Image: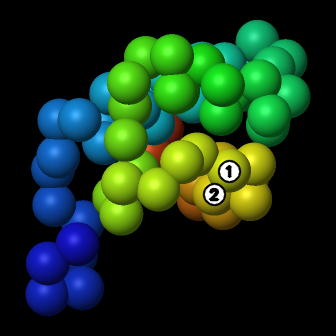
């Protein structure tokens, strides 16, 4: 985010696309986290993926759907 607006970040977009597809396939939040870790997708802070992080992203799913 820059000046209050989303800025394109290819790595973040790749992780979010994976996350959305996995969620659409019925994966649990924990399984999505495990998948992101296996894909070597990092969070913005470099912290491990947590179900609460995935849930927060999914709450804003409407923002990310335009990326597909």
Q: Which residue is mark 1?
A: 50
Which of 35 and 18 lies nearest the eye of the viewer? 35
Residue 60, above or below 18: below
Nearer the camera: disc 2 or disc 1: 1
Quadrant, the C terminus = top left
- Farthest-out residue, front: 47
* Alpha carbon distance from label 2 to label 1: 5 Å
User: In which quarter of the view is residue 2 placed?
Assistant: bottom left
Could you say where residue 48 lies in the image, as x and y percent from the top left?
54, 48
Could you say where residue 36 lies in the image, as x and y percent from the top left?
52, 27
Could you say where residue 5 lies in the image, as x and y percent from the top left?
22, 75
In the rendered structure, the answer to whether residue 54 lies left or right of residue 67 reads: right
Q: Are marks 2 and 1 in contact (CB under 8 Å)?
A: yes
Q: Which residue is mark 2?
A: 53
Quadrant, the N terminus = bottom left
SS category of the residue bearing label 2: helix
């Amino acid at each position: 985010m820059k000046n209050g607006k989303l800025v394109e970040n290819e790595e973040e977009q790749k992780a979010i696309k994976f996350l959305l597809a996995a969620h659409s396939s019925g994966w649990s939040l924990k399984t999505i986290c495990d998948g992101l870790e296996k894909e070597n997708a990092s969070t913005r802070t470099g912290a491990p993926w947590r179900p609460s992080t995935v849930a927060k992203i999914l709450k804003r799913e409407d923002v990310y759907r335009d990326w597909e």
